[in-house]
Amino acid sequence: MPAKQQTPTALYDYPKYWAECLLPAPFLPMSRDEMDQLGWDSCDVILVTGDAYVDHPSFGMAVIGRVLEAQGYRVGILSQPDWRDPGSFSALGKPNLYFGVTAGNMDSMINRYTSDRRLRHDDAYTADDIGGKRPDRAVTVYTQKCREAYSDVPVVVGGIEASLRRLAHYDYWSETVKRSVLIDSTADILLYGNAERAMIELTHRMARGENIRDITDLRGSAFLCRNIPKGWREIDSTQIDQPGPLAKPKNPYESSKTGDTDDAKTIRMRSENPSTCATGQVNLDDIDQQAQPVAIVPDTQAIKTDPNSTYIRIPSFDQVLEDPVLYAHADRIFHRETNPGNARPLVQSQGRNDIWVNPPPIPLETEELDWVFDQPYKRVPHPTYGESKIPAYDMIRFSVNIMRGCFGGCTFCSITEHEGRIIQSRSEESILNEVEKIRDMTPGFTGVISDLGGPTANMYRLNCKDKKIEETCRRPSCVYPTICVNLETDHKHTTQLYRKTRDLPGVKKVVVASGLRYDLAVRDPEYVKELVTHHVGGYLKIAPEHSEDGPLSKMMKPGMGSYYEFKEMFERFSKEAGKKQYLIPYFISAHPGSTNEDMMSLGLWLKTNGFRVDQVQSFYPSPMASATTMYFTEKNPLKPLGKNNQEKIFSAKSQEQRTLHKAFLRYHDPENWPMLRKALRRMGRSDLIGSGDGFLVPGESRREKEVMRRDAKKTRPKLKSQPRSSRIKPRRR
């Protein structure tokens, strides 16, 4: 029975497994020798990760390992095993319960390739920053290698790479739509998001003898389904949101093969007879499932459906592969079902199976999150790495994560899809205890906390004012297009935390380095003053992302008004504190919806405001992000996809276009001037070429003009002279 709404057991209230009697391991073992030293004959769970093993709460596999250890299980770590050597996956022997597989803290493809699909030669999550220590599509490869090592051992996949591939998704690197990673990897179950709750429940039930294939009721899980469970009613996603005109409108029940029949009555039987799977009696491989537009069902009706007995069927893999409208429609439905309070299961047909995705996990309470962070982490890399540097660890070893989640809903970001939109905050006591641990345990600490933040620095304890409203809301963002009136915007808890942290003995300075949501910050001038006066290390990162309303609306980011308001506050409070401090704004090039004109305007804005961007963040289409849907389909899933939404979204897809958009942001680089001049002339904006404040790039130098003249002469076609006799002489009259 799939997951139903219920009050979850607190993480620390589960009866412990027998190995609770053993002392916590100094480090989770990475070899048989370490297991022998601990007196272990076997591991209950073996975690496979594409990252170097750092025993720190900022590294996902360390968190899961320590949480399971606290439940009484013996957990081993296979860190960056050699996927070309099958023996690497049997180094710790056969696990008693399962393999847990993750690509690591980053998606393996994003980790390995730039936004222009160029190979990276470094890896911040690997000792000595060496690239190539994990395979492409690591979740799939690792799972298959675990199967080769022990074919009868269940495999659980999770982490960000698996989370963002739980359904059919556009794959930027192959430029096509790919199936769920569950199918490609052959894993038994997928746990998405922050999976402590689901992982603990799953492990205890498997330890009691339950078959992993029978565990289908975990929130935050996805699995292959041959038969729809009894008691569930199906809603077609087109009853919730009309997909609009399709690429090839057809009768949805018309078979593509002569002799194959399937009518609407048979389809309805899925609901009337739940034992009939969508792929049981009806072969979906033989059916053309192009759906026709249907009448819009009022949203209120959709909201009233019971999430404990109703699931939503979204367009199949074959449909979203062939039709951009249906892909955008599926994305829109997916992002509507992200609130744990009212989300319904999603079901998608992929070949002979359905992918069943249960609603998101119930967010952790403060006491539970404290418990997770209070486990006995050593806070350093495993001794096997010796003196090798792990850049990702060096970046976070003096930082503290104070919360999880983000309600911003930025379309290019995957935090909401992974961590959820409800803020989960730690207590002051837990945070202060961690600062003291850094002071006392972390080598090289000089008294400076390098960051006190999270996905966003200033969302700590900012939640909905009304729990009932929070549980029924379907807004994709609490701050766009305006800040919701039901959102708490008082930063008093964050301000108080800052003051208490810097008052701790041995702490000289606390820097806030996480990205700041400035449209929220301006609601609380006292917070801005506290931040600017005490917690800016000379520079403060903020992310307007763009200056123009068109691209900003596709990003679900605020207009520049709040930026100017925050800038005024920042400069005023810096002056009052007697400090010279600077804002460092971040911008994205080539984001869907950004035209050449938009990028030109952003370049002018940067020049007018005196910014010279050294590094440019080019849009990276990560799986299942709404902006990725815009990039792939050229449709806008932020609006109903009916006949009134015929907007075509421009995306810079060619390398030439993407390079040009970067060049506008780096208008000051002489190497970009020839390209920009050419583009400006093509756009009819030669008036922006020249010297002075009102121009974007300077005109050609004398030398450049001479080179252009010489090149023009070389390329000018030569006219062949005609023979003397063939020349036409004028007639005399």
Image (cartoon, helix red, strand yellow):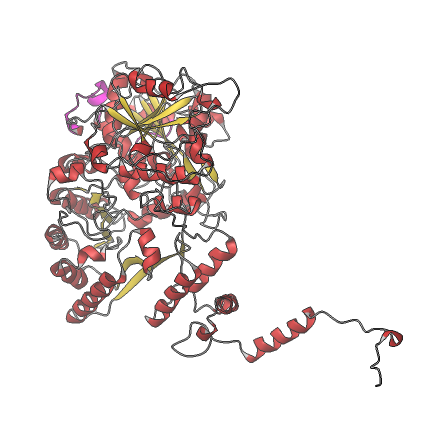
In the image, is residue 36 above or below residue 107?
above
Tell me, yes or no, if residue 137 can be seen here.
no
x and y, in percent, of residue 271 in the image = 30, 20
Quarter of the view holding residue 188: top left
x and y, in percent, of residue 106 in the image = 37, 41
x and y, in percent, of residue 366 in the image = 14, 38
Q: Is residue 541 left or right of residue 315?
A: left
Rendered-image quadrant of the N terminus: top left
In the image, is residue 268 above or below residue 638?
above
In the image, is residue 181 above or below residue 417?
above
Asked whether 566 or 79 is in front, the reply is: 566
Please check the rendered image and state whether residue 13 is part of the magenta-colored stretch, yes or no: yes
Q: How many marks?
A: 0
Please check the rendered image and state whether residue 350 is part of the magenta-colored stretch, yes or no: no
Please state the extent of the stretch shown in magenta in the rendering. Answer: 12-31
Asked whether 649 or 118 is in front, the reply is: 649
The residue shown at (32%, 52%) is 555
Q: Is residue 471 left or right of residue 184?
A: left
Q: Is residue 363 left or right of residue 212?
A: left
The residue shown at (45%, 19%) is 283
Rendered-image quadrant of the C terminus: bottom right
Residue that sits furthest to the bottom in the current view = 733
Q: Is residue 318 left or right of residue 12?
A: right
In the image, is residue 649 above or below residue 608?
above
Quarter of the view holding residue 227: top left
Tell me, yes or no, if residue 432 can be seen here.
yes
